[in-house]
Amino acid sequence: MDGLMTRDVQPEGFPPSLSTRERDRRWKNVRDLMRSRNLDGLIVGGFRGREHFESYLTDDYVEGVVIFPLDGDPTVLTWTGSRVSRAQESYSRGVAAWVSDYRVGLQGPTAARLVQEKGLARSRMGVVGLESSGPGETCGVIPYTFWKAFIQEIPDATFIDISQPFAKLMLVKSDEELALVRYAGAIAEKACHTMLEVVRPGVGEELIYAEVMREIFRHGADARYPTLNLHSGPHNISWGPPRWISRVEPPRRVQKGDLVQAEIFPCCGNQEIQVQMSIALDPVDEAIRRCEIVARQSYETGLKVIRPGITFADIVHAMEEPLREAGCWAKTPLIHSLSPCGWTGQTSVNMEQLEGRKEGRVEDKTSLRKAVRGGDLVIERGMVFALEPNACIESVRANIGGTVIVSEMDCEQLNSLSTHVQHVS
C-alpha cells in the first residue's frame, strides 16, 4: 500500500475532540501573530465562508464573527438565537465551552458597539475575511453592507487585513488536530469503499451520491463545500457538483466504458480531508488508460518529493513533469493545502490543447497560464495537503488522489483506494 499507515475509524458517534489546552495553544499563537503586527484586536469573519475561520478560535461555527482582543475574553456574534441555544445545549451536556460570551446581532453597528465596549474603538485591529484565496471566495467572506456600516460606526479605528497570515498560522496542525484529520481520512476511505461497491452499469448517479454521503454522515462527520463532486462518462471533462443538484436535469446512469469520478470532502472538527475517487467500468478506451497511468505517475512523484524544507512550488513543478512528458494537461490543481485550502498547485503544462475549445474560450488568454498560488510556502511537519493529480488528453480526464500529512522526513498517506483508478466490470 505504498507505506500507507492504516487506522480504523473509531466507533460511531465517538470522533476525537479538542481540549481547552488546544484552545489555549491556538489563542496564544494568534495573539503572538497580533503582537508581531502591532494589533490590539482582531475581527474574524466566518459568515458563510468555506473555511469557517471563526471556528479556529471558538471550536464552533455560528455563521458570524468573533471579536478577539489582545487582552481579555473574545465574544461571538451570530445572526440567530438558535445558534446560541444550540451551544448552550451542548454545554449543558458537559461539553467544555471555548467561549462563554455568545450574542445575537450580526449587523455592522452591533459589531461596532461591541468593539467600543472592549475599548478598541481607536485601536489598530486585524481583520480576517476581507481577502481570501479559498475556493469560491475570491472576494472574501465579509458582506459589503456589514463592513460599510461597521467601519462607519468606529471611524477612528485602523483596520489591517491579515487573512493570509491567519490562514498560514492554521496550516501547521497540532497532535489533537491531526487526530481529527486521520479520523476524517479513515471515513473517506470507507466512503471510497462504498462507492466502489455501488458503481455498476445501470446505476444512477443519484444513488452513488447518496451512498457516499451516507457513509460520511453515519460516522458523525460533515462534508465541506461543495459537498461532493460527481461526474461520469467516457469523455467527460466537467467538474464540480452534479448539475442535477441545482437544476431540473435527470441524473445520468453509468455504463460500460465510463469513468465515474468523485471528489469527496469529509470534515471533522473543521479539519478537512479530500479524496479523488475514480472508477473505470471496463472496458475503457486507450485515452482513459493513458490518463490513468500519467495521473498515478504524478502522484508517486509527489510522494517522493514532499518533505519539510522544500517549497510548495517545488512539489508542483515535480508533479507536472509526468504530464509534460506525456503531453497531458491538468484541469484542476495537482496539490493544494487543507484547512485552509488557500495554497493551490495549478499548472499550465500543455494548456495549448485548450485553444479553440470551450475550456479555452476566454477573453484574456493569459488566464490559461495557470499559476501556483503560494509557491514560496516552506513545507513544515504537521501540514496537510490534498495530493490530487489529474491528467487530461483533450476532453478525457483521470483524477486520483488522497490526503497526506507531512512528517519528519516525508509524508504519511491517509488513503489508498483513491490513489489508483479502480476498475470494475
Image: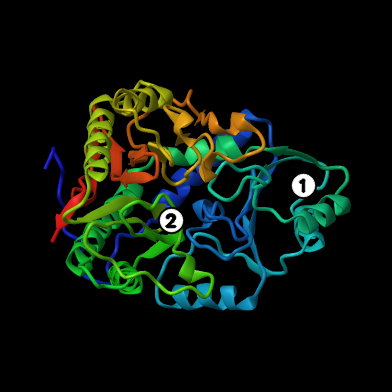
Total labels drawn? 2
**Residue 288 position within the rendered picture, expressed as x and y whole percent measured from the top left:** 26, 45
Q: Nearer the viewer, residue 335 or 35?
A: 335
In front of the other: 420 or 29: 420
Query: Hey, what amino acid is under mark 2?
Result: Asn
- Could you tell whether 161 is left or right of 416 in the image? right
- Mark 1, Cα crowd under 10 Å, few <14 / some 14-19 / many 20+, is many
Front-lying residue, 229 or 123: 229
Q: Residues within 10 Å of mark 2 (few under 14, many from 20)?
A: many
* Mark with earlier residue (1, 2): 1
Where residue 248 appears, as percent x and y from the top left, is 52, 75
Using residue 110 as the reference point, say whether residue 372 is left or right of it.
left
Q: Report, in whole angstroms, how far the alpha carbon at label 1 lies from the one at label 2.
A: 29 Å
Residue 386 at x, y percent in the picture? 35, 42
- Residue at the spot 87% in from the left edge and 42% down from the top edge: 156
- Residue 293 sits in which quadrant? top left
User: Is 202 situated above or below 315?
Assistant: below
Q: Which residue is mark 2?
A: 270
Q: Secondary structure at mark 2?
A: loop
From the viewer's side, name the closer residue of 244 and 58: 244
Residue 414 in view in this figure: no
Question: In the rendered structure, which amino acid carries the disc numbered 1?
Answer: Leu
Judge from the rendering whether residue 96 lies leftward or rightward of residue 10; answer left or right: right
Q: Which residue is mark 1?
A: 120
Residue at 30% across, 23% down: 325
